[in-house]
């Protein structure tokens, strides 16, 4: 399961973990029992009593293993590729140490006042995350690297693509729309699956980095990553998936992969790095960190109230204290209230 998924909350969630696993295993077993690999559909047959019924009878398959396609290749093929990509640069060491000191103090204070277990867990998680970043920045490395697996299966004219990350829908649509042209019509239907063979974290398309929000910013500490992904990740994952499908259908990976849509073309004039080394701008990054600090300090009792947010025309979103509210004033251009 993902680092923040079912079962990550401790023994109280183990029952849910076993229950969900039993449900998934039962569904897989039921589907497996319905697959009849030794039979195939025969010719159409007309059956008539009062009404005329058209049906197909199952006929035994000939001996010889898997079906062979017209081009001589087997109908079932699999390919897996592991990619290693750089994340965004570490923040400057003084920034990393300042954040580490902040979350260390919040963790110790939560423990001292005997804060609820859930609050203390959040405080400990944020301290562990900040410590990882401080160690990386102190090592002298410019940026950390992470690995993601792209797995592809071809079954006749159907393909299944799996990615070890929480890929946003745009990646699935991009692969599906380009798969037919990339495989020269050999693959007509594509199923795209996230959370396959692990889960790195969210993989947003390039356009999301200008919008900010949970998938770009907050998921960094939710998935305990040492830094954020960059806009180059999603195009690389899509390209790797399509190259695999191209190879599984006998194509040339260098020439046959269909051109990307405009949303998956990286623009060299767009820079998403802020002055503290993190993507998406220091303002939004620090706003979300402050939300967590307030959550810890108020023992989980403070969340940003809906009536404490006013959306401003095009200049951004300004969170102002409502009457009787303890919400702080934050300026967070140009994200939306739901992104907070």
Image: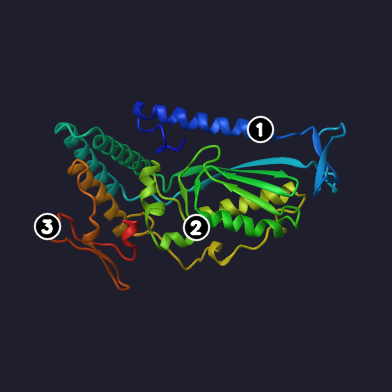
Q: Which residue is mark 2?
A: 205
* Crowding near the residue tagged with mark 2, few <14, some 14–19, many ≥20 C-alpha atoms within 10 Å: many
Q: Which mark is residue 5?
A: none
Residue at the image point whose x is 74% and y is 49% from the top: 157
In terms of depth relative to the viewer, which is nearer, 231 or 14?
14
Q: In the rendered image, which quarter contains the C terminus?
A: bottom left
Can you give x and y, in whole percent of width and height, for residue 97 in the image?
A: 26, 44
Q: Earlier in the sequence, mark 1 or mark 2?
A: 1
* Crowding near the residue tagged with mark 1, few <14, some 14–19, many ≥20 C-alpha atoms within 10 Å: few
Q: Is residue 75 left or right of residue 166?
A: right
Q: Which mark is residue 32?
A: 1
In this rendering, which labeled residue sits more in front, label 1 or label 2?
A: 1
* Crowding near the residue tagged with mark 3, few <14, some 14–19, many ≥20 C-alpha atoms within 10 Å: few
Q: Which residue is mark 3?
A: 324
SS at badge 3: loop
Q: Is residue 152 above or below residue 25?
A: below
Q: Is residue 149 above or below residue 233?
A: above
Q: Earlier in the sequence, mark 3 or mark 2?
A: 2
Q: Is residue 275 left or right of residue 304?
A: right
Can you give x and y, in whole percent of width and height, for residue 319 in the image?
A: 23, 62
Residue at the image point whose x is 45% and y is 45% from the top: 201
Q: CA distance from mark 3 to mark 2?
A: 40 Å
Residue at the image point whose x is 83% and y is 45% from the top: 49
In terms of depth relative to the viewer, which is nearer, 160 or 12?
12
Q: CA distance from mark 3 to mark 1?
A: 59 Å
SS at badge 2: loop
Q: Are marks 1 and 2 in contact (CB under 8 Å)?
A: no
Can you give x and y, in whole percent of width and height, for residue 124 in the image?
A: 28, 35
Can you give x and y, in whole percent of width and height, for residue 67 in the image?
A: 82, 39
Colour theme: rainbow
């Amino acid at each position: 399961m993902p680092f923040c998924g079912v079962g990550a909350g401790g023994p109280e969630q183990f029952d849910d973990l076993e229950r969900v696993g039993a449900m998934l295993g039962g569904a897989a077993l039921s589907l497996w029992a319905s697959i009849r690999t030794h039979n195939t559909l025969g010719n159409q047959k007309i059956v008539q009593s009062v009404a005329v019924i058209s049906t197909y009878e199952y006929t035994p398959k000939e001996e010889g293993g898997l079906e062979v396609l017209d081009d001589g290749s087997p109908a079932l093929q699999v390919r897996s590729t592991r990619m290693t990509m750089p994340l965004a640069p570490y923040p400057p060491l003084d920034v990393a140490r300042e954040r580490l000191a902040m979350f260390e103090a919040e963790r110790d204070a939560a423990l001292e006042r005997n804060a609820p277990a859930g609050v203390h867990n959040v405080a400990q998680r944020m301290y562990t995350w900040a410590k990882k970043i401080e160690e990386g920045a102190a090592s002298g490395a410019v940026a950390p690297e992470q690995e993601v697996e792209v797995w592809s299966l071809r079954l006749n004219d159907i393909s299944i693509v799996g990615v070890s990350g929480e890929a946003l829908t745009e990646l699935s649509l991009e692969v599906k729309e380009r798969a037919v042209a990339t495989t020269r019509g050999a693959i007509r239907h594509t199923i795209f699956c996230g959370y396959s063979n692990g889960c790195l974290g969210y993989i947003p398309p390039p356009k999301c980095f200008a919008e900010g929000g949970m998938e770009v910013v907050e998921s960094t500490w939710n998935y305990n990553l040492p830094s954020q992904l960059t806009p180059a990740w999603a195009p690389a994952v899509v390209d790797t998936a399509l190259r695999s499908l191209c190879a599984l259908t006998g194509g040339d990976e260098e020439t046959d992969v269909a051109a990307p849509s405009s949303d998956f073309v990286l623009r060299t004039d767009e820079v998403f790095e802020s002055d503290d080394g993190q993507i998406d701008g220091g303002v939004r990054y620090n706003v979300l960190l402050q939300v967590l600090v307030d959550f810890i300090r108020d023992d989980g009792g403070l969340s940003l109230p809906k009536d404490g947010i006013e959306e401003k025309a095009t200049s951004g979103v300004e969170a102002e204290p409502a009457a009787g509210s303890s919400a702080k004033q934050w300026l967070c251009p140009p994200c939306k209230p739901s992104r907070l």
